[in-house]
Amino acid sequence: MTNTLQMTRRTMLTGAAVAGALTPILIVNGSAHAEEVMAANAPRKAPAADLTKLQREKVELVKPPFVHPHSQKAEGGPKIKEFTLTIQEKKMVLDKDGTEVNAMTFDGSVPGPLMVVHQDDYVELTLINPETNTMQHNIDFHAATGGLGGGALTVVNPGESTVLRFKATKAGVFVYHCAPPGMVPWHVTSGMNGAIMVLPREGLTDGHGKPLVYDKIYYVGEQDFYIPRDENGKFKKYDSPGEAYEDTLAVMKTLTPTHVVFNGAVGALTGENAMAAKVGETVLIVHSQANRDTRPHLIGGHGEYVWATGKFANVPDIDQETWFIPGGTAGAALYTFAQPGIYAYVNHNLIEAFELGAAAHFKVTGDWNDDLMTSVKSPSAS
């Protein structure tokens, strides 16, 4: 391991260390200097809007797949919604074999929590990077306008915190992720991403005036991990993200993930952790993938209303079997369960679902409807 990656955590973060070993990926006008890009996107003038009369609402985030309580229609005028995210660098176990990743996370989960606001609300985020962390971090909201989505204004070293406010002008579901200078792909594929949902003030509709209301909402974050192997083909373990960096980067450059999982681990949303619903309940499924394309499919059900690219100003597709969510995007699908049973919810790249881990379950209770499906003749010898 190079001396660069053995330096102190603050040095690692501020750029001369890890950033010097990384290839910057932010390129503007031919320049590949991430620090210059960040500086160019810093604000030159303070905003003039007077927000002192707006109501403030502090929101307590919850761990996915669950979502904090919220109203589907806006109540009153725009508000300032206050959120707090604490960055956690932690080891996580990815599968039953005990494969480890030195994950970087928002609030300790992969994905980070889903935030919900309404269009024209203000998002005011306190981002905390505890002193116990080793890396520099920030946050880029795809829902935000300007300053690299907030990334230029939120760079925090270990022991620092910052507050970002932006106006949620576009309705839809959007990815957020860490994007520190020169280290974006490493942090994103180490788990540092999540989503925000900006609901229309009048709530969801079918695009033709019909209101759409959900009884439950679940958030599925799909994550690709790139775990190095030793000379015997076994997954390696490391004491810190910095120690794993060079080997992990080599695997990342193959563009071939070792794990593609929902909510941080193989089986994280199956068995006792399956998402629950009842026959007759309408469920909104928010699905994000911050890095790679994906193809969600509900086996035995459908996407009755689907915003595949997640933007609620668009008329949703209807009655979809499988829908395509581009990498770096969050999508949403609405379905009313009509039959009881265990429904598999998968990435319909079936290799990734069955071999790499991109699968979840819905456990649905209620009465069976023979009119929708029945066994006419049980299997028997011919």
Image (cartoon, helix red, strand yellow):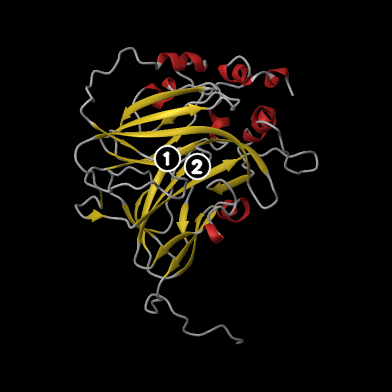
Can you say whether 30 is above or below 360 in the image? Answer: above
Which residue is labeled 1 in the image?
195
Which of the two labelled residues, at mark 1 and mark 2, occupies the earlier sequence position? 2
Type of amino acid under label 2: Pro
* Label 1 crowd bin: few (<14), some (14–19), many (20+), radius 10 Å: many
Q: Is residue 52 visible?
A: yes
Out of 377 and 158, give the one closest to the viewer. Answer: 158
| Residue sitting at the far right | 232
Type of amino acid under label 1: Ala
Can you say whether 311 is above or below 381 in the image? Answer: above
Q: Position of residue 370 (x, y in %)?
A: 40, 79
In the displayed structure, does residue 356 sit left or right of residue 178? right
In the displayed structure, does residue 163 sit left or right of residue 22? left
Out of 371 and 73, give the one closest to the viewer. Answer: 73
Which residue is labeled 2 in the image?
111
Q: Quadrant of the N terminus?
A: top right
Q: CA distance from mark 1 to mark 2?
A: 8 Å
Can you say whether 280 is above or below 102 in the image? Answer: below
Quick one: SS at disc 2? loop
CB contact under 8 Å: marks 1 and 2: yes
Q: Quadrant of the C terminus?
A: bottom right
Look at 50% across and 37% down and name the residue there: 107
Q: Position of residue 281 (x, y in %)?
A: 35, 63
Look at 35% across and 48% down and name the residue there: 69
